[in-house]
Image (tube, grey):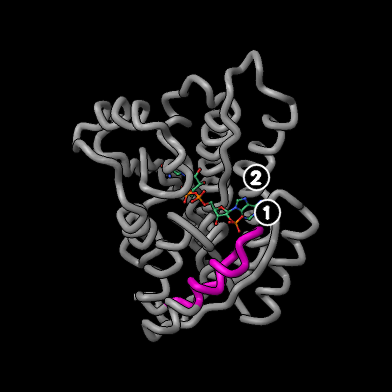
Amino acid sequence: MLSGKTAVVTGASRGIGRAIAVKLASMGAFVVINYNGSEERAMEVKREIEAGGGAAAVCQCDVSDYGKCESFIQNVIREYGRIDILVNNAGVTRDGLLMKMSEEAFDQVIATNLKGAFNTIRFVSRQMLKQKSGRIINLSSVVGVTGNAGQANYAASKAGIIGLTKAAARELASRGITVNAIAPGFIETDMTSVLPEKAREASVAQIPLGSFGKPEQVAAAAAFLASEDAGYITGQVLHVDGGMVM
Ligand code: NAP
């Protein structure tokens, strides 16, 4: 269980981040629910956690902003004393074919998905080094491993997450800090709800287990990686993808 632990989950107002926040809180962690624009939905997550007997706080921060991440993490440490678990989940897509992709669409996706994870790890790792313990979990994606037409920016950001995870795992291992990535396949969230029916059918056809996954199934993997039981696992990429990539 995670009683006495403090967890920060970025992008926890919706989808997978929401499910991870609820799961970690159900295991006893105090959860800091980060969001960027969806304040009301972040408050709903807090209410859901409290209704289940857990404890949480809500904190706005655009993770792509280095300076704001520094203040965000410092405020969490000042208010709650420690950070035991960091889940870098915040992510966006700006899909388009490479030849038509704007510089801004490329930069925004890299800034949120990849630099956002660097920004939080940069400031949280100092605290975890002092504590001589910690768990960092970064959300990658199957397309960070396989690539995907129309997602050059997103695939690059998610492949970057894997490199960042492994480098951080090597740097932080000697102080008892583990760093792992989760690579989900297609999961039922706002991000995939925009897929046209035909594209959805084509996607399901590539999934050996025959359906999209649920945010709770990714949250279960994050909860395991955050637990004491995962203490000897670091630098790994855990696929939660119905067998898409094997
Ligand atoms: P989602 O439903 O679109 O939710 C995205 C979350 O990220 C929201 O809570 C959003 O907060 C937050 N966010 C976006 N930009 C942010 C920023 N600059 N700063 C802070 N928070 C920000 O996405 P999801 O499907 O749950 O995906 C969650 C993670 O899993 C992402 O990293 C995604 O790439 C990855 N993933 C998803 C799938 C899938 O099939 N769904 C597959 C593979 C990987 P606001 O609403 O407050 O802006």
Identified at 65% across, 59% down, the residue is 37
Q: Between residues 172 and 8, which one lies in front from this camera angle?
A: 8
The kind of residue tagged 1 is Val
Marks 2/1 in contact by CB < 8 Å: the verdict is yes
Residue carrying label 1: 63
Q: Earlier in the sequence, mark 2 or mark 1?
A: 1
Could you tell me residue 89's position as x and y percent? 52, 52
In the image, taking residue 224 as reference, residue 149 lies left or right, namely right
Q: Which residues are magenta?
A: 29-46
Find residue 112 and name its label. Answer: 2
Q: Is the distance from the Cβ of mark 2 to the nearest ligand 1 atom less than 8 Å?
A: yes
Which type of secondary structure does the marked residue at label 1 adopt?
Answer: loop
In the image, taking residue 175 as reference, residue 234 lies left or right, namely left
- Position of the N terminus by quadrant: bottom left
Q: How would you rate the neighbour count of disc 1 (Cα within 10 Å): few for under 14, some for 14-19, many for 20 or more?
A: many
Up/down of 7 relative to 51, above or below = above
Q: Between residues 13 and 155, which one lies in front from this camera angle?
A: 13
Up/down of 124 relative to 192, above or below = below
Q: Is the distance from the Cβ of mark 1 to the nearest ligand 1 atom less than 8 Å?
A: yes
Up/down of 41 relative to 213, above or below = below
Identified at 69% across, 41% down, the residue is 111
Identified at 57% across, 59% down, the residue is 10
Quarter-of-image position of residue 131: bottom right
In the image, taking residue 95 as reference, residue 240 lies left or right, namely left
Identified at 72% across, 59% down, the residue is 69
